[in-house]
Amino acid sequence: DAGVTQSPTHLIKTRGQHVTLRCSPISGHKSVSWYQQVLGQGPQFIFQYYEKEERGRGNFPDRFSARQFPNYSSELNVNALLLGDSALYLCASSLPRDRGTYEQYFGPGTRLTVT
Amino acid sequence: QKEVEQNSGPLSVPEGAIASLNCTYSDRGSQSFFWYRQYSGKSPELIMSIYSNGDKEDGRFTAQLNKASQYVSLLIRDSQPSDSATYLCAVNRLGGSARQLTFGSGTQLTVLP
């Protein structure tokens, strides 16, 4: 089975621009979470979506938004990019809670560089 | 106080030795615990999950959880150079709908041939 996929792999943007990152979860997984990882730190939670609804939001500004589509894929949007948004953006998918397991599996990530 | 703290490292062990990685967490409501391995330039890979007090073994890996002490550890037996990576501890507070993982900063492990 294919794992979590993300696109693009790398991205270079200029301050003030907008970016859209995409994620497709593992087949059968309905929950998608987004994380930001800056160099030398652990990932930080941004959003979780389940059944197209936002189920959790981390401590990130309103410039960050996301959505989930009927096929459970997801987009993360970041507006008015700042230099500090340069990071590895990770998408993770997981089975529904009622399956009794809570493991999250990460995709390869999108490396965003803001200049 | 950080929510999840790990040995700052880096940690070096000789090949064949046991590597011991430690993690403490501050939220007593945390109920699920995970260890991820992250190679340089790659994304985190789940290697262990543990939900109950005690030990859980999977091959060369053993996770240990002590909720009373708010402590979780990972032992890697017969360490190999291929185990050289950053190990991330993550915890999840169940309840509600959020699958929010809170990560430590990671411990960098080097296994010397």
Image: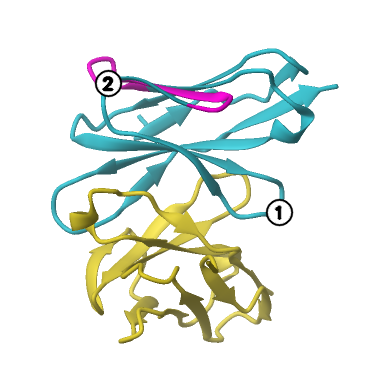
Chain colours: A yellow, B cyan
Where does the N terminus of chain B fall, quadrant-wise? top left
Asked if residue B46 lies in the magenta stretch, the reply is: no
Could you classify mark 1 by the number of other residues whose Cα lies within 10 Å: few (under 14), some (14-19), or many (20 or more)?
A: few
Amino acid type, residue under disc 1 in the picture: Gly
Could you tell me which secondary element the residue under label 1 belongs to? loop
Span shown in magenta: B58-71
Badge 2 or badge 1: first in the primary sequence: 1
Q: CA distance from mark 2 to mark 1?
A: 33 Å
Could you tell me which secondary element the residue under label 2 belongs to? loop
Position above or below: B12 against A45:
above
Residue located beneath label 1 in the image: B41
The residue mark sitting in front, 2 or 1, is: 2
Asked if residue B81 lies left or right of residue B71, the reply is right
**Label 1 marks which chain's residue?**
B
Taking the image as drawn, is residue B27 in sight? yes
Taking the image as drawn, is residue B84 in sight? no
Image coordinates for residue A112, horizontal then vertical, percent:
62, 71
Q: Are marks 2 and 1 in contact (CB under 8 Å)?
A: no
Position above or below: B34 against B1:
below
* Residue drawn at point x = 20 percent, y = 29 percent: B28
Q: Residue furthest right?
A: B113
Where does the C terminus of chain B fall, quadrant-wise? top right
Image coordinates for residue A85, horizontal then vertical, percent:
54, 67
Image coordinates for residue B76, horizontal then vertical, percent:
59, 22
Residue located beneath label 2 in the image: B53
Say which of A70 and B70 sits in front: A70
**Label 2 marks which chain's residue?**
B
Image coordinates for residue A20, horizontal then vertical, percent:
51, 84
Asked if residue B60 lies in the magenta stretch, the reply is: yes
* Residue drawn at point x = 54 percent, y = 63 percent: A107
